[in-house]
Image (cartoon, rainbow, N blue to C red):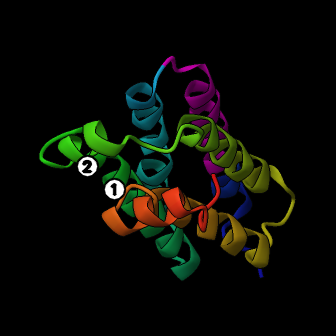
Amino acid sequence: MPLLPKDLQQRLASEFRFAADKVAEAPNLPAKLYFFSALFGETNRIMNQSWNAELALLHMVLLSAHREINGRLTGAAADLNRAVGLPERLPEALTEISRNLADLFEEETIGVPELHTLLARVAELGYTCTGNGQYLYLKGQIRI
């Protein structure tokens, strides 16, 4: 069973590709994160036209990761960022996962197991920006 009607999948694929290209071109993590936000934003708009629980999962994981990363760049959590830093490869990893999501939605049929694998990676990237996630990253248990 397809996740979306073909026209909506194509729209999402097109928006994901545009966002992924912008993430890749962005010169720094805040700019990359800005364009990364288009992924959950467009997913939210698509859900208004065609509800699917897998899309809700995609939206929530992308939104959560964005919030965690953004939290480390701004506000009180920025102090932690200055103290211990962020994973060095985080900007590159955001580019990779954005491209991977665009690639997946450009496929004829979206594989749910493949989607879940990518969602796990997005969650992992966001989790590295939590206190415990940063600790596990520094211990070498989470690899970026």
Q: How many marks?
A: 2
The answer to whether residue 48 is visible is: no
| Contact? badges 1 and 2 (CB < 8 Å) | yes
Q: In the rendered structure, find residue 71 and report the number of the disc placed on it.
A: 2
Between residue 45 and residue 73, name the one nearer to us: 73
**Element on which disc 2 rests:** helix
Disc 1 to disc 2, how far (Cα)?
Answer: 5 Å
Dot 1 surroundings within 10 Å: few (below 14), some, or many (20 or more)?
Answer: some
The answer to whether residue 21 is visible is: yes
Pinpoint residue 55: horizontal percent, then vertical percent: 54, 70
Between residue 82 and residue 55, name the one nearer to us: 82
**Looking at the image, which residue is at 61% across and 49% down?**
12
Furthest-front residue in view?
139
Q: Amino acid at mark 1?
A: Glu
Would you place residue 24 above or below residue 122 in this image?
above
Q: Quadrant of residue 15?
A: top right
Q: In the rendered structure, find residue 68 and report the number of the disc placed on it.
A: 1
Pinpoint residue 95: horizontal percent, then vertical percent: 63, 37
Q: Amino acid at mark 2?
A: Gly
Dot 2 surroundings within 10 Å: few (below 14), some, or many (20 or more)?
Answer: some
**Looking at the image, which residue is at 42% across and 68% down?**
60
Q: Is residue 117 left or right of residue 84?
A: right
Would you place residue 119 above or below residue 42 in this image?
below
Query: Which region is colored magenta?
Result: 11-27
Q: Residue 5: within the magenta?
A: no
Q: In the rendered structure, find residue 60 and report the number of the disc placed on it.
A: none
If the image is split into quadrants, where does the N terminus sit?
bottom right
**Looking at the image, which residue is at 71% across and 71% down?**
117
Q: Quadrant of residue 126?
A: bottom left
Furthest-left residue in view?
76
Pinpoint residue 29: horizontal percent, then vertical percent: 44, 30
